[in-house]
Image (spheres, helix red, strand yellow):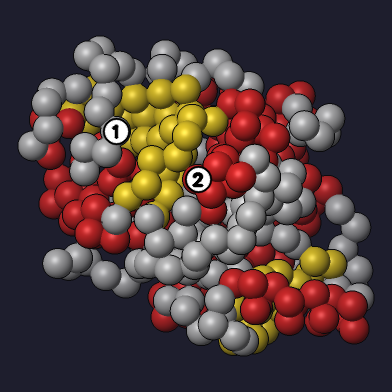
Amino acid sequence: MHPALSATAIAGVAETIGPYIRHTPVVAADLADFGLPALPIRLKLELLQYAGSFKTRGAFSNLLTRTVPPTGVVAASGGNHGAAVAYAARRLGMPANIFVPTISSPAKLERIRSYGAHVHVVGERYADALAESEKFASASGALPVHAFEQIETLLGQGTLGREIEQDCPDIDTLFVAVGGGGLIGGIAAWYAGRVRIVAVEPEGSPTLFNAFAAGRPVDSPTDGIAADSLAPKRVGELMFPLAQAYVQKPVLVSDDDIRAAQQALWDGLRIVAEPGGAAAFAALLSGKYRPAAGERIAVLVCGGNTTAVSFS
């Protein structure tokens, strides 16, 4: 594991970005409210973060702790990371160029544009947008801000683990959705084994699942309803040792499981989560993960950049 990815470093970044982010709320619920055997759970509503997702933490971590040239920053994103970088850049008075694939949702593209960034729609998948963003960075000198393969990004996302521990100090188990792994890697670096961290991935993009099977990050399919946030082709090299040490084997959920979780969060709590944001809850709602009696569970609802309210 990279020595810079420590709890001490995460705490330092939390102080640096604190004035620029929200401490998002936790809501108490019970699985009985969703037709499952009774068990109290807590939902960390990070979808209420500025720019609509946890990605804002990593964006500010990069922009506040690295040297940004006059040409500003450039990022590739399925949508949420781009919105976060665009928001942080506007807040700090920096130019931003964001590269997104054609699968990005209209809600996410609109949010990125609303923050004043220059948006480049290129290719069908995140990997295509990333390649074009790298060309732009080389030509312009802009600072690349990677969605997950960057120490500062992982440290920023790790501040969410710190905040969850502050809010829910007694939990046994935390459910976290996985795309490139910046979020779960940062959270794993914070907890370092003090709680059980359950990774949840779509069946159509099992990046961490396949990496565990191979013993290293490998290319995976990039399909499914959550492909604009949870399908980067492979997990990051920086996060993988953290996952091997501190993260449970991923639970895979179907697109129907994710849609059902979106609908349940809306029906039961009036929470409008995007597919990637609802994926962690889908592991419980679908029965793909069956909690033990008395298990103290928190679920991270990590993003809400969608215009959908009816999910049927």
Q: Residue placed farthest to the left in the image? A: 35
Task: Looking at the picture, tell me which residue is in the foreground, 86 or 75.
Answer: 75
Mark 2: secondary structure: helix
The residue indicated by pointer 2 is 209
Picture quarter with the C terminus: bottom left
Residue under the point 64% across and 40% down: 215
Crowd band around label 2 with a 10 angstrom C-alpha radius: few (<14), some (14–19), many (20+)? many
Left or right of 139? Residue 284 is left
Task: Name which residue type carries label 1.
Answer: Tyr
Picture quarter with the N terminus: top right
Q: Position of residue 169 (x, y in %)?
A: 46, 16
Task: Looking at the picture, tell me which residue is in the foreground, 114 or 255.
Answer: 255
Determine the CA span between mark 1 and mark 2: 15 Å
The label number, if any, that marks residue 289 in the structure image: 1
Q: Is residue 182 above or below residue 225?
A: above
Quarter of the view holding residue 73: bottom right
Query: In this orientation, does residue 223 appear?
Result: yes
Task: Looking at the picture, tell me which residue is in the foreground, 20 or 110.
Answer: 110
